[in-house]
């Protein structure tokens, strides 16, 4: 089955870069469309839901998301693929739902994403965004792991 619409959640990690590489290879081979999506995690800034975001914080969010998307786009272009891009923001507990919704709304045939491969206590404390997307996505999910 050819994958025509490949969604890649991206962040600034090495494993995310590997996911972009794999997705670009598939997009080229299948003549598909690649969409890079970055979710700015609001919790990472220490903000709470009760804290209204000021202009400076909004600008900071926009700039952080733009940087991640810009680097991901450059990587895709180096791999011979011109991607679509999208940046959204969400609280940590809504990251999985946000990514699953993004894939559904865009009509993704495949989600390609990196997994940090945490196990044990780290996995229990942090949870796995990749695992959540794998469990809840209607589209197939390809998980890319960093080796070595």
Image (cartoon, rainbow, N blue to C red):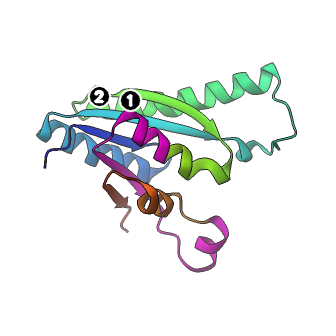
Q: On the picture, is 128 further left or further right than 91?
A: left
- Secondary-structure class at tag 1: helix
Residue 77: image tag: 2
Image-based side of 132 in relation to 85, left or right:
right
In the rendered image, is residue 100 in sight? yes
Residue 11 in sight here: no
Determine whether 145 is above or below 38 in the image: below
* x and y, in percent, of residue 60 in the image: 71, 27
Is 9 situated above or below 65? Answer: below
Q: Residue at x 28, y 25 (%)?
A: 82
Residue 33 image offset from top left, x and y in percent: 25, 31
Q: Which residue is mark 1?
A: 73
> Where does the C terminus fall, quadrant-wise?
bottom left
Tell me which residue sits at (46%, 39%) in the image: 102
Chain part drawn in magenta: 100-126
| In-front residue for pair 53/119 | 53
Q: Is residue 60 above or below residue 26?
A: above
Give residue 39's quadrant in the image: top right
Image height check: is 65 above or below 44? above
Would you say 43 lies left or right of 130 here?
Answer: right
Q: Residues within 10 Å of mark 1 (few under 14, many from 20)?
A: many
Image position of 86 (left or right of 138): right
Spatial CA span between label 2 and label 1:
6 Å
- Verify whether residue 112 appears in magenta: yes
Taking the spot 57% from the left edge, 31% from the top edge, the residue there is 65
Label 2: element kind = helix
Seen at 81% across and 29% down, the residue is 53
Residue 141 rendering spot, x and y as whole percentages: 34, 56
Q: Answer yes or no: do the residues labelled 2 and 1 have beta carbons within 8 Å?
A: yes
Q: In front: 45, or 4?
A: 4
């Amino acid at each position: 089955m050819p994958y025509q619409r490949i969604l890649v959640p991206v962040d600034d990690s090495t494993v995310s870069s590997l996911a972009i590489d794999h997705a670009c290879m598939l997009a080229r081979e299948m003549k598909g469309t690649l969409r890079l999506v970055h979710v700015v995690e609001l919790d990472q800034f220490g903000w709470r839901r009760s804290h209204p975001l000021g202009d400076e914080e909004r600008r900071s969010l926009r700039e952080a998301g733009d940087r991640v998307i810009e680097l991901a786009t450059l990587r895709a272009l180096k791999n011979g693929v011109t991607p679509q891009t999208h940046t959204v923001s969400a609280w940590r507990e809504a990251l999985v739902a946000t990514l699953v919704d993004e894939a559904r709304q865009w009509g993704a045939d495949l989600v390609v994403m990196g997994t940090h491969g945490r196990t044990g206590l780290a996995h229990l404390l942090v949870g796995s965004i990749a695992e959540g997307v794998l469990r809840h996505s209607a589209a197939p999910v390809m998980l890319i792991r960093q080796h070595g």
